[in-house]
Image (cartoon, rainbow, N blue to C red):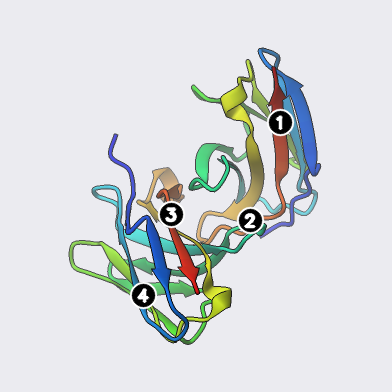
Amino acid sequence: DAKTTQPTSMDCAEGRAANLPCNHSTISGNEYVYWYRQIHSQGPQYIIHGLKNNETNEMASLIITEDRKSSTLILPHATLRDTAVYYCIAISGSARQLTFGSGTQLTVLP
Amino acid sequence: AAGVIQSPRHLIKEKRETATLKCYPIPRHDTVYWYQQGPGQDPQFLISFYEKMQSDKGSIPDRFSAQQFSDYHSELNMSSLELGDSALYFCASSSPGQGGWETQYFGPGTRLLVL
């Protein structure tokens, strides 16, 4: 699976949009981009995933660049409960394991 | 919606003891994964099972074994426990989605402390 690179930490004001970037320049054509988050010591929580097209669900939006070398997770109206470590993972459809990198610590400030 | 259930949620053991962690996947999910997260570390994949057969193996110590039962629940057996086994242990489950891609859903974890 392709290596992903994320900023170590980010801050966001409560109520504002949080934009979390992820670089995956070596991603292959059959690899999806998955986003999970982990709120302190809780189980990782699935957020969203995509292959080529932008995706949106009740939690977030995922914007993938046309060349698929990077993506951005958008939390439209961040709340204090969104404070967590966010993981961007590139994974092929046949893979049986998630490889967690360092992730981005997002802190939502009041 | 039903989620992954793990038991116990907390476990304290002495060195050289054994421990058994249990995982009950989301109903109709046929694949189970185990991950270990040490203090200050990111989750690391240990092992996975699909339809009761081991499908992938990660950095699981030889002292650990696991299996998946006919009702799809899984147990992680840990023997000769060491201080370094103190960690959060997460179970995740999945079922083939559209096109065969599988999204993993995690349980709340078992916190193991080895004294």
Label 3 or label 4, whichever lies nearer to me, is 4
Point out the tag, 1 or 2, that comes first from the N-terminus: 2
Instruction: Write down the residue under mark 2.
Output: A100
Distance between the Cα atoms at labels 3 and 4? 14 Å
Q: Chain of mark 4?
A: B
Q: In the displayed structure, would residue B95 be above or below residue B86?
A: above
Name the residue carrying label 1. Answer: A107
Mark 1 or mark 2, whichever is nearer to me: 1
Circle 4 is placed at which residue position?
A: B19
**What residue is rendered at 28% in x and 39% in y?**
B2
Dot 2: element: loop
Marks 1, 3 in one chain: no
Badge 4 marks a residue whose secondary structure is strand
Disc 1 crowd, CA 10 A, few/some/many (<14, 14-19, 20+): many
Q: Secondary structure at mark 3?
A: loop
For mark 2, does the 10 Å Cα neighbourhood hold few (<14), some (14 to 19), or many (20 or more) residues? Answer: some
Disc 4 and disc 2 in contact, CB within 8 angstroms: no
- Identify the subunit bearing mark 1: A
In the picture shown, does residue A58 fall above or below B14? above
Q: At x 76% / y 48%, what residue is drawn?
A: A24
- Residue B77 pos. (x, y %): 36, 77
Tell me which amino acid carries mark 2.
Phe
Does A78 sit above or below residue B53? above
